[in-house]
């Protein structure tokens, strides 16, 4: 199951607890929850004998399979294998992920609970299919939990991981809207469905809240979701990996900086053109100040690196550089502030996200490119990026649905150019079949 399908499956994730079902069979409760809109089911049986656990898993799989809903087994890889379940969920004290993957194979879903930011960081090195951020709030259904993340902790965890995320702990009709707004891909509920008088109605209510919250997500959150596959290709690119650990060949970095110098000068000019498009003088002044400060910081970093590496910037713009500059300029010349902002946004936002990613995963050894990372991971650059994101959301809110779709297209094309820019820096004009 690919990443987007995993994220969809996590939307309303039912974790079973037979003790809360009020005398009803688990099949009855799960069947009703399916009708109400659950998207994934985890069978959690801490005390059931193995044979009973396997038999129950098989019955649930028969119930879930026609609806295309994955069945996940909590903790027990042997039960998951015996019942041919769709996957396994493990905690920090359960079987190691590498052992679980070796047993279940490459095609089964494996989720991992994380209980603090250190767990989140360690999970980043694992090829898990999703992480369960646990607990977000305290919950009576599980007493042996770590300190709750809270909403702010959840936001930080979501921001730090590339894995799909499901929020666990204290999920109910009064909390799930805030949790989805904070960035979680889905919520894991127990008592809110299992103990409900009508599991179907409870699931319907929860699913409606989730769907409504997703529908009202800001434009920038939606477009970031759409661009995640591009971002993931960027941070997996050898240019970024080698830049992060300091092993990037000097000639590749020099080639990139020479092109970036061309692009940044053009970008600076366009930022001031963009400022002139703002709807009032206060916003124009604010944007000019942001552009001036940002370009000065990037210029200082560029000058330092140009001098250090003896970079000749008197080079011709590459086909990628020309294409990217033409893309942003055409949207500025369109006269549409919304489209111009969308086309210009990736250069700020993706650089900031890449800088922060490298900073979080940086090699402690001296890095000849440390100034590059520090510039784009700095608090000032991050704060400036947030300012632009807020502005984009306000502009998008006032735009028509057709304009927002055009904004999305302009952003995604620019994001692809970001990947292509680093790709050209690494491979130059080598044949495209090697520049992957």
Image (tube, rainbow, N blue to C red):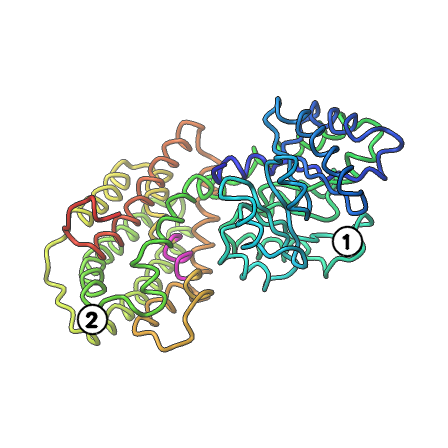
Q: Residues within 10 Å of mark 1 (few under 14, many from 20)?
A: some
Q: Is residue 123 magenta?
A: no
Q: Position of residue 141 (x, y in %)?
A: 81, 47
Please tell me whether the stretch drawn in magenta is mainly helix, strand or loop.
helix
Total labels: the figure holds 2
Task: Report the residue at 68% width, 46% height from top.
Answer: 76
Q: Position of residue 201 (x, y in %)?
A: 76, 26
Q: Residues within 10 Å of mark 2 (few under 14, many from 20)?
A: some
Left or right: residue 285 versus residue 162 is left
Out of 376 and 266, give the one closest to the viewer: 376
Q: Is residue 352 magenta?
A: yes
Above/below status of 294 relative to 213: below
Q: Position of residue 29 (x, y in %)?
A: 78, 28
Out of 347 and 91, give the one closest to the viewer: 91
Out of 332 and 18, give the one closest to the viewer: 18
Left or right: residue 226 versus residue 47 is left
Q: Secondary structure at mark 2?
A: helix
* Residue 92, quarter of the rendered image: bottom right
Left or right: residue 179 versus residue 384 is right
Q: Position of residue 338 (x, y in %)?
A: 38, 39
Going from the N terminus, do you reach mark 2 or mark 1 first?
Answer: 1
Q: Secondary structure at mark 1?
A: loop
Q: On the image, numbered disc 1 is attached to which residue? A: 138
Q: Residue furthest right?
A: 23
Which residues make up the magenta segment? 349-355
Above/below status of 290 relative to 52: below
Q: On the image, numbered disc 2 is attached to which residue? A: 306
Task: Report the residue at 40% width, 43% height from top.
Answer: 229
* Residue 110, quarter of the rendered image: top right
Task: Report the residue at 40% width, 27% height from top.
Answer: 402
Task: Report the residue at 23% width, 39% height from top.
Answer: 330
């Amino acid at each position: 199951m690919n990443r987007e399908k995993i994220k969809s499956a996590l939307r309303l994730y039912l974790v079973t607890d037979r003790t809360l079902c009020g005398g009803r069979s688990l099949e009855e409760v799960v069947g009703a929850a399916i009708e109400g809109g659950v998207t994934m089911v985890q069978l959690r049986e801490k005390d059931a004998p193995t044979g009973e656990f396997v038999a129950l898993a098989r019955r649930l799989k028969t119930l879930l399979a026609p609806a295309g809903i994955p069945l996940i087994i909590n903790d027990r890889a042997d039960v998951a294998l015996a019942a041919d379940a769709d996957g396994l969920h493990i905690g920090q004290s359960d079987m190691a992920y590498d052992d679980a993957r070796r047993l279940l194979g490459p095609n089964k879903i494996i989720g991992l609970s994380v209980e603090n930011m250190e767990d989140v960081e360690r999970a980043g090195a694992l090829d898990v299919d999703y992480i369960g951020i646990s607990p977000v709030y305290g919950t009576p259904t599980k007493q042996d939990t770590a300190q709750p993340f809270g909403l702010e902790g959840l936001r930080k965890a979501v921001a730090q991981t590339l894995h799909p995320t499901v929020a666990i702990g204290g999920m109910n009709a009064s909390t799930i809207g805030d949790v989805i707004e904070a960035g979680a891909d889905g919520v894991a509920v127990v008592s809110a469905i299992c103990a409900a008088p009508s599991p179907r109605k409870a699931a319907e209510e929860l699913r409606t809240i989730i769907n409504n919250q997703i529908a009202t997500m800001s434009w920038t959150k939606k477009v970031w979701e759409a661009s995640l596959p591009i971002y993931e290709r960027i941070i997996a690119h050898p240019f970024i990996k080698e830049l992060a650990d300091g092993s990037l060949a000097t000639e590749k970095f020099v080639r990139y900086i020479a092109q970036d110098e061309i692009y940044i000068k053009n970008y600076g000019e366009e930022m001031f053109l963009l400022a002139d498009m703002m709807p009032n003088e206060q916003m124009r002044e604010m944007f000019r100040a942001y552009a001036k400060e940002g370009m000065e910081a990037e210029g200082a970093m560029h000058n330092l690196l140009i001098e250090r590496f003896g970079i000749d910037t008197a080079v011709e713009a590459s086909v990628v550089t020309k294409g990217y500059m033409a893309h942003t300029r055409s949207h500025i010349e369109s006269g549409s502030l919304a489209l111009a902002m969308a086309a210009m946004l990736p250069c700020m936002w993706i650089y900031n996200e890449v800088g922060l990613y490298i900073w979080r995963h940086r090699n402690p050894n001296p890095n000849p490119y440390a100034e590059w990372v520090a510039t784009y991971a700095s608090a000032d650059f991050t704060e400036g990026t947030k300012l632009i994101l807020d502005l984009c959301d306000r502009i998008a809110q006032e735009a028509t649905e057709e304009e927002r779709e055009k904004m999305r297209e302009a952003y995604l094309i620019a994001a692809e150019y970001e990947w292509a820019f680093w790709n050209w820096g690494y491979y130059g004009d080598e044949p495209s079949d090697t520049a992957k």
